[in-house]
Amino acid sequence: MLESGLLSILLLGFTLGIKHSTEPDHVIAVSTIASQTKRLLSSSLAGVFWGLGHTIMLLVIGVTVIALNQHIPEQMALSLELLVGTMLIYLGFAGFKNNQKYNSSKKQHFHKKSLIIGGIHGMAGSAALVLLTTAKAQTGMQAFLFILIFGAGTIIGMLLFTTILGLPFLISASGHKKIHLNLVRVSSAASILYGLIYLFEVGRNFFS
């Protein structure tokens, strides 16, 4: 049986992982992918693969940094955050472009795209998670388990969110083309706008 102290740490990590999946930049990023899917299963799996990419990066970077007893420099962490903002803007413009090809039969690799997007978010969030993990975990194994269970929480959270987010797009796509196109445009515009705001806020800290 797990020790009560370790169990509480893992429960905290799982809860924080689910909460982490609700952050605006995460939700906006996956909504641009959910808007392009034609099946609810594809929309749901987009969230799963986002969570996998996110978790893999957190494990690789987080465990390595903690094992070496190091920390991620603030400027490097901010640089990764700038990458997230840039990615959100790109996803928004890509959403507008793909919106015009929605009826195309060309296969789109949503899962690969979701994995990459999740990985970028994972890199950007690794600095904060390292600080949180070192504050909660007492051993290297506890740190590994904390990050792993945190990742499991984000995977479940994103699975739920992409399923919910995908419903309006899928329902409107069948017989309500104009509504569907407008929903995609709103999603894409939100990604661009939030990306610009994100870049501005992070840029102020980066260049200060």
Image (cartoon, helix red, strand yellow):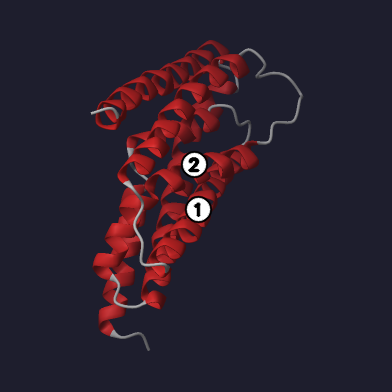
Residue 1 to residue 120: above or below? below
Position of residue 169 measured from the top left corner of the image (x, y, whole percent): 52, 26
Residue drawn at 25 percent across, 26 percent down: 204
Q: Residues within 10 Å of mark 1 (few under 14, many from 20)?
A: many
Which comes sooner in the sequence, label 1 or label 2? Answer: 1
Three-letter amino acid code at the position of disc 1: Met
Residue 196 to residue 7: above or below? above
Q: Report the disc number at residue 57.
A: 1
Residue drawn at 31 percent across, 44 percent down: 74
> Hey, which quadrant is residue 65 in on the image?
bottom left
Q: Report the disc number at residue 120.
A: 2
Position of residue 8 measured from the top left corner of the image (x, y, whole percent): 26, 74
Q: Quadrant of the C terminus?
A: top left
Measure how far apart labels 1 and 2 are at the Cα level: 8 Å
Front position in the image: 54 or 24: 54
Front position in the image: 180 or 155: 155
Front position in the image: 28 or 90: 90
Q: Quadrant of the N terminus?
A: bottom left
